[in-house]
Amino acid sequence: MSDPKSGSSSTPDSIHWRSLIAAMAAIAAVGIAIGLGLPLLSIIMEKRGIPPTLIGLNSAMAGVASMLCAPFTARLAHRYSTSSVMVAAIVLSAASSLGFYYIQNFWLWFPLRIVFHGATTMVFILSEFWINAAAPPRRRGLVLGIYATVLALGFANGPLLFSLLGSDGPLPFAVGAFVILLAAVPILIARKESPDIDEKPEMHFMRYILLVPTATAAVFVFGAVQVGGLSLFPVYATRAGFTESQAALLLTVMGVGNFLFQIPLGLLSDHMKDRRKLLSIMALVGMVGAASLPLLSQNWLLMAVVLLFWGGCVSGLYTVGLSHLGSRLTGADLAAANAAFIFCYAVGTVAGPQVVGVAIDVAGDDGFAWSIAFFFGLYVALSLARMVFRPKRA
C-alpha cells in the first residue's frame, strides 16, 4: 500500500514507528483492561452466589460477541474510517465496563458482555489490520512479534492490577474504563495515518476464512489450545499428582514461553520464503509436546521445560499466522481477512474447552493430552497438504 495513510513509509524495509506505536499502544491498553476485567467479574459473581455453570456461561459471551461482531467490522471501517470506528468502539467498551458496576441484575450482564467484548473485538481487528498494513513486508514478522509481546504484557498486567485494586467498590471499574479510554489517545494522534478501506471487501465474509486457510486454521488451533488448555490444565495437573501451586507455576512457565518466543519467531519468519513451513514446524512441536505430557507427569522440572517451548510454539501460531495473512492480502481484503482471523479464534475458544473436557470424561486424565495433540495433528495435516498441493508462488 503506497498511500501515506496506510502507514507505509517511503522505503520498503523501514518501520513507520508512529503509526505502529499508535495501534500497539491502543491494543495494549485494551489488553490490560480485559486482563483486569475477566477475573474481576468472575470474583464478583462468585461473591454474589452465582453458580459456576452460570459464571462460565456468562464468560462464554466473549466468544459469542467476537463471532457476532467480526463479520461487520470491515464494512463499518469502510463506511466511517478505521480510526473513527476504533475510537467509537473504545468509548463503547469503556462505558459498558462501568455498566458492570452500576447494573446489579445478573441477567443483564449477558447483553452487557456482548457489548463490551464486541467493541473490544472491533478494536483488536482494526488494530491488527493497521499493524499489518503498516508493517514493511520484509520485517512483518518482527513487527508482529513485537505486537504479540506487547499484547502478552498487557494481558499479564491486567491480573496484576486486579491484585492491587481488589474487587470492592467502583475503583477497579473506574480504573478499567480509564485505561480503555487511554487507548483512544494514540489513535487520535495518528488518525491521519490510519489505513482507510476505500472499497468494500470483494467477497462474502465467510469466504475469507477459506482464502488463507493456513492462517485461519492456525488461529483456530491457537484459540482452542490456549483456552482449552489453560482452562483444564490445572485439573489435569492436579489429577496427575501435582499440587495446585505446582500446577499454577507450570501455567506461569507457559506464559513465559509465550512472552519470550514471539519476537524470535517473528524474526525467523521474516527469513523464510514460505511461512507455512514455520507454522507446520510449530504445530508439530505442539503435537509432540502435548502427546508427551503423560510421560512427564512424574517429573515437574522436565514438564516445565517442555511447556516453556510448547507455550512459545502455541502462541507463535497466532503471530506467524497473522504475518502470513498480511503477506497475502492488502486493503479491504486484508481488513476482512483480519476479521475472519479473529472470528476463527473465537470459534476455537468455544470449541477447545468443550473438546478437551469431553476427552477427559471419555478417556480419563490422558484425554487432556490426546485432545490437544489432536488439534495440532489436524493442523499439521492441513498445512502439509497445502504446501504439497498449493506450493508458494514466486
Image: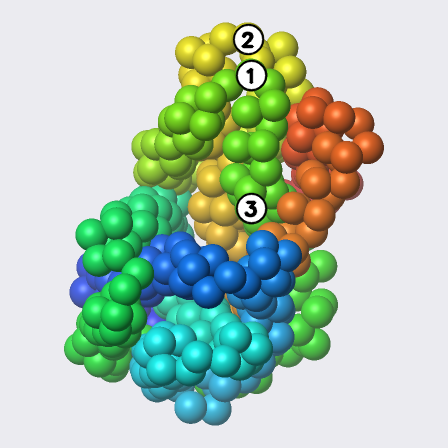
Single out the mark in the foreground, 2 or 3: 2
Q: Is disc 1 placed on a helix, strand or loop?
A: loop
Labels 1 & 2 near each other (Cβ < 8 A)? yes
Q: Residue 298 carries which label?
A: 2
On-image quarter of the N terminus:
bottom left
Residue extending furthest toward the bottom: 79
> Three-letter amino acid code at disc 1?
Gly
Q: Is residue 187 visible?
A: no
Tell me: residue 387, above or below residue 79.
Answer: above
Q: Nearer the viewer, residue 300 or 322?
A: 300
Q: Which of marks 2 and 3 is nearer the N terminus?
A: 3
Residue 304 sits in quarter: top left
Q: In this view, does 320 lie to the left or right of 296?
A: left
Q: Earlier in the sequence, mark 3 or mark 1?
A: 3
> Three-letter amino acid code at disc 3?
Val
Image location (x, y in percent) of residue 373: 68, 29
> Three-letter amino acid code at disc 2?
Gln
| Colour style of the rendered protein structure | rainbow
Tell me: residue 320, above or below residue 73.
Answer: above
Q: Is residue 64 visible?
A: yes
Tell me: residue 131, above or below residue 113.
Answer: above
Q: Which residue is drawn at 50% across and 27% down?
A: 310
Q: Distance between the residues labelled 3 and 1?
A: 22 Å
Q: Which of marks 1 and 2 is nearer the N terminus?
A: 1
Q: How crowded is mark 1: few (under 14 residues within 10 Å), some or many (20 or more)?
A: few
Q: Is disc 2 placed on a helix, strand or loop?
A: loop
Single out the mark in the foreground, 1 or 2: 1
